[in-house]
Amino acid sequence: MQILSNASMNGAGLFAETLRIASRTLLAAAVAGTAMVGLTGSAEAKWDRTRLQCRFDGPSDYSFSARYENRTRVVRSHGGPGGGGSNAGQSGARSTFSAEFEAASGIGFSAGDVIVISIDTATAAPVDVGSITLSLGFNGDLVGELQYSTQAPPQQNGIKRPFPSNFPKPSASDTISIAKNGSTLGGCTLN
């Protein structure tokens, strides 16, 4: 508050004194900010993503496709108290699975038919993970869809649902098969 008490200072001197004090204040803030970063380290977040998909085209005019995606937010910190190592933590995992079936009318499929979906992993027996009930599409085809999500809202038109408890974690080279009335229609390998 030397600026206010020095009545003899002219306008230019007052301006220079104000700049000097402001510079010291900014320098002190910058030093404090740098010290804080040194204490806490810096953090970098990114998403690790796994995306697997496959498609099967039947011998007549029908097809099936499936897609699994897992995104995990990985936080890597650099530095911090007591050393400058790097450590990683995971948070915010999100997974989705979707399956779609489509068939032309008149080839043995009807509205209301149930298509059962199973996943055959390398480490376990095949697991039925859900089913698709066919309905008549706007163009006359028979269609159905199944969606699972770790962040599924409460029944969004009955399509997107939480993952069932028996759902295995898919990996590349796992096979997804579809069946109708106990007869296998075909399958595809995730990649």
Image: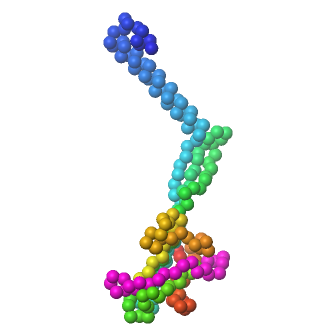
Image check: 126 left or right of 30? right
Image check: 85 left or right of 141? right
Q: How many numbered marks appear?
A: 0
The residue shown at (53%, 76%) is 190
Compare residues 148 and 7 and report the one nearer the observer: 148
- The chosen color scheme is rainbow
Q: Position of residue 96 (x, y in %)?
A: 51, 68
Q: Position of residue 162 (x, y in %)?
A: 53, 69
121 vs 74: above or below: below
Compare residues 115 and 76 and report the one nearer the observer: 115
Q: Is residue 134 magenta?
A: yes
Image check: 31 left or right of 83? left
Magenta stretch in the rendered image: 121-142
Compare residues 115 and 125 and report the one nearer the observer: 115
Q: Position of residue 28 (x, y in %)?
A: 50, 26
The residue shown at (49%, 66%) is 154
175 vs 154: above or below: below
Quarter location, residue 18: top left
Q: Is residue 188 magenta?
A: no
77 vs 101: above or below: above
88 vs 42: above or below: below
> In this rendering, does residue 70 appear at all?
no
Q: Position of residue 39 (x, y in %)?
A: 60, 37
